[in-house]
Image (cartoon, rainbow, N blue to C red):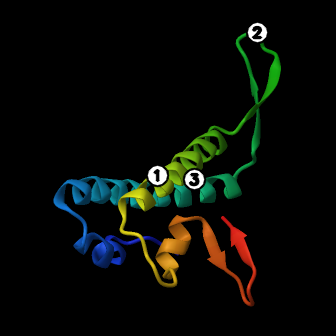
Amino acid sequence: MLLKKEMFSAMLRDLPSERKCVAESLIETLIFMQHTLTDLSEKIEAEVTIISHMNGNKVETMTENPALKSYNNTIRNFSTTCRTLTQYLPKESEEEDELMQFLKGRIKQRGNSEETV
């Protein structure tokens, strides 16, 4: 599910202005991070996760692909930002919509089981 700013308009409508400003900033950050994660994911899939290179002493060493390291840091920040955003958005008393399930890290599977993202 690709996030778009329009998906949040109904949720933002009822927020007080001081919370809306922070929520909008978090939304823009989430959208940017999602695009970054997609790019990094494609780069990792096209390359290897462990890179072999020669250090200054002409010794071959193995290191983690920098894209993988960036991906891991970004996904951690993405998850934290999702949690922070859910604290700013109004609480839903009825069944959560798909967007809130995504932000809270749950995807409804067929049947009644849930899978954590």
Mark 1 → mark 2, Cα distance in angstroms:
42 Å
Mark 3 = which residue? 40
Mark 2 = which residue? 57
Q: Residue at x 63, y 37 (%)?
A: 66
Looking at numbered disc 3 in the image, what kind of residue is underneath it? Answer: Leu
Q: Residues within 10 Å of mark 2 (few under 14, many from 20)?
A: few
Residue at the outermost left position: 17
Where is residue 109 drawn, in percent x and y? 70, 83
Looking at numbered disc 1 in the image, what kind of residue is underneath it? Answer: Thr
Where is residue 21 drawn, in percent x and y? 22, 55
Where is residue 33 drawn, in percent x and y? 46, 54
Q: Nearer the viewer, residue 91 or 75?
A: 91
Q: Residue at x 61, y 59 (%)?
A: 42
Where is residue 30 drawn, in percent x and y? 42, 57
Give the label on residue 81, or none: 1
Q: Residue at x 69, y 39 (%)?
A: 65
Residue 76 horizontal side relative to residue 26, left or right: right
